Image: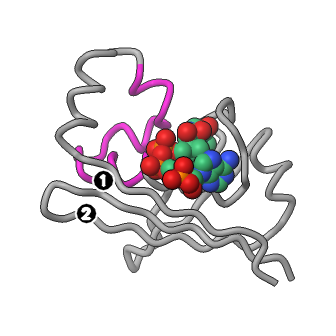
Amino acid sequence: MIEGIGIDVVDIDRFSQSLERTPTLVDRLFTASEKTLPLSSQAARFAAKEALAKALNAGKGLPWLDAEVINLESGKPEFLFRGEIADLIDGACVHLSLSHDAGIASAIVIIERR
Ligand SMILES: CC(C)(COP(=O)(O)OP(=O)(O)OC[C@H]1O[C@@H](n2cnc3c(N)ncnc32)[C@H](O)[C@@H]1OP(=O)(O)O)[C@@H](O)C(=O)NCCC(=O)NCCS
């Protein structure tokens, strides 16, 4: 059964300006490996975490580092959950798709519980 869906789009230039304006932001949003990625991939991961919050119907305040996006060998992105978000997900299957092009990064999340 589909339990939740979420979508988000991010203007990559504006996201870059936010990171420059607030130097602590990158550590608040991204894990060590996410921080090594190019800007467009980071913007897509930000979109993924926003889309996840929507799929969970959560307000502000979820710990961003509790949801990490990794890539499988094929390139397919997947979430790794820990802490508070792992408790909320509670074993559900979480599908994630990312895209970035033409100055925009976007993500779709589907939470499925079997
Ligand atoms: C709720 C939130 C995701 C909205 O994102 P946003 O970038 O401000 O706004 P967007 O333009 O992308 O989306 C707006 C739409 O989100 C939807 N939305 C608002 N609150 C929502 C919620 N609690 N759950 C799901 N969808 C929500 C609404 O449809 C809204 O559009 P509308 O007002 O026209 O109906 C954002 O305000 C937020 O809380 N961010 C923090 C997320 C967070 O804690 N992330 C860490 C997780 S790892």
From the viewer's perspective, is 41 left or right of 4? Answer: left
In the rendered image, the quadrant that contains the C terminus is: bottom right
Image vertical order of residue 34 relative to residue 106, above or below: above
Of circles 1 and 2, which is in front? 2
Mark earlier in primary sequence (1, 2): 1
The foreground one among 51 and 30 is 51
Coordinates of residue 62 in the picture (x, y in percent): 68, 35
SS at badge 1: helix
Q: Dot 2: few (<14), some (14–19), or many (≥20) neighbours within 10 Å?
A: some
Residue positioned 39% across, 80% down in the render = 74
Residue 6 picture quarter? bottom right
Query: Which of the labelled discs sits on residue 41, or is there none?
Result: 1
Coordinates of residue 106 in the picture (x, y in percent): 36, 61
Q: Which residue has dot 2 on it?
A: 100
39 in magenta: yes
In the rendered image, the quadrant that contains the N terminus is: bottom right
Coordinates of residue 86 in the picture (x, y in percent): 78, 50
Residue positioned 24% across, 51% down in the render = 40
From the viewer's perspective, is 98 left or right of 91? Answer: left
The foreground one among 91 and 75 is 91
Amino acid type at mark 1 = Ser
Q: Give the alpha-carbon distance from disc 1 to disc 2, as whole Å.
A: 7 Å
Q: Which residues are magenta?
A: 25-46
Residue 36 picture quarter? top left
